[in-house]
Image (cartoon, rainbow, N blue to C red):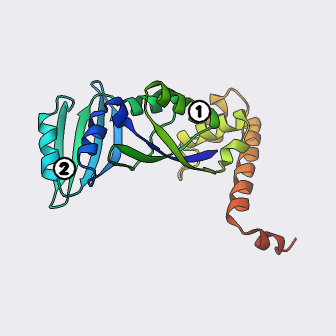
Amino acid sequence: MPRVHLKINPAASEDWLATLSTEFPDTEFQLLSSHPTDTGVLGILQIQGPDTDEIVRRFDDASEVRSYDLLHTDERSVLIRATTPVPEGYRANRESGTPPNFPARMQDGWIHTELTASHERLSQFTDELAAADIPYQILSVTQSHDSTEELTDRQQEFITEAVERGYYDSPRGCTLTELAESFDVNKSAASGVLHRAEGRIIKEFVAASVPKTALDGAPE
């Protein structure tokens, strides 16, 4: 699955925070988290630079800031939790099913971030950016391998359900029989699906983590 490092310029779509960062180009804004709310997006932001007092005053005056709290402040940085309208860049993430990756660094209007998603979702994400007139630039693309890509849909369903219900916890959150009943199959069939899925995941993990020379030199 590709991992893309890109930069995005939401200031071009009149995003309030990105536009603010262009007024203080020497200040670094770190987007640490964001969560949708009934009234917009609740985000946590770290601001580092020489003008933090003036930037906080902008939060007082901006109509886009529906509420905010100062979580920490010192001579060179502040930590702010704020609720704002949904930015177009965040909307593009949501519409394409590519959740934003944190922390993301913003400076002089540009956000630097990484996304890991399928080619289809990344393509949809860039289409959403283009539709919102948000300039972007792809800086690098690397291929990260996800062991779950080796699983069939059925195996993925079983493994996901088993993890969510605590089958792999100690003590177990559910039994194999209970897991089988949730899929309306017998215990033997459930065991077989899990065993094959676990085998694929373990083999992929070993192949990715053990040097090839070590495997070649291992005794039969």
Residue 7 percent location from the top left of the image: 45, 45
In-image side of 146 versus 188 (left or right): left
Q: How many marks?
A: 2
Place of residue 171 in the rendered image (x, y in percent of width and height, measured from the top left): 53, 51
Residue at point 68%, 26% (across, down): 184
- Crowding near the residue tagged with mark 2, few <14, some 14–19, many ≥20 C-alpha atoms within 10 Å: few
Which one is nearer the viewer's eye here, 14 or 74? 14
Q: Secondary structure at mark 1?
A: helix
Residue 71 badge: 2
Circle 2/circle 1 CB separation < 8 Å? no
Give above or below for 190 relative to 3: above
Q: Is residue 192 above or below residue 126?
A: below
User: Percent position (x, y) of residue 77?
Assistant: 21, 57
> For the view shown, which residue lies furthest in the right direction?
220
Q: Which residue is mark 1?
A: 123
Q: Which mark is residue 170?
A: none
Q: Is residue 217 left or right of residue 87?
A: right
Can residue 177 be seen here? The reply is no
Q: Please report the residue visible at 74 percent of the width from the left and 39 percent of the height from the top.
A: 193
* Residue shown at 78% from the left, 73% from the top: 213
Which amino acid type is marked by label 1?
Ser
Q: Secondary structure at mark 2?
A: strand
> Which amino acid type is shown beneath numbered disc 2?
Leu
The image quadrant where one finds the N terminus is top right
Give how far apart the Cα atoms at labels 2 and 1 are.
37 Å
Residue occupying the point 71% across, 33% down: 154
Left or right of residue 60, residue 208 in this image: right
Whether residue 59 is visible here, answered yes or no, is: yes
Q: Residues within 10 Å of mark 1 (few under 14, many from 20)?
A: few
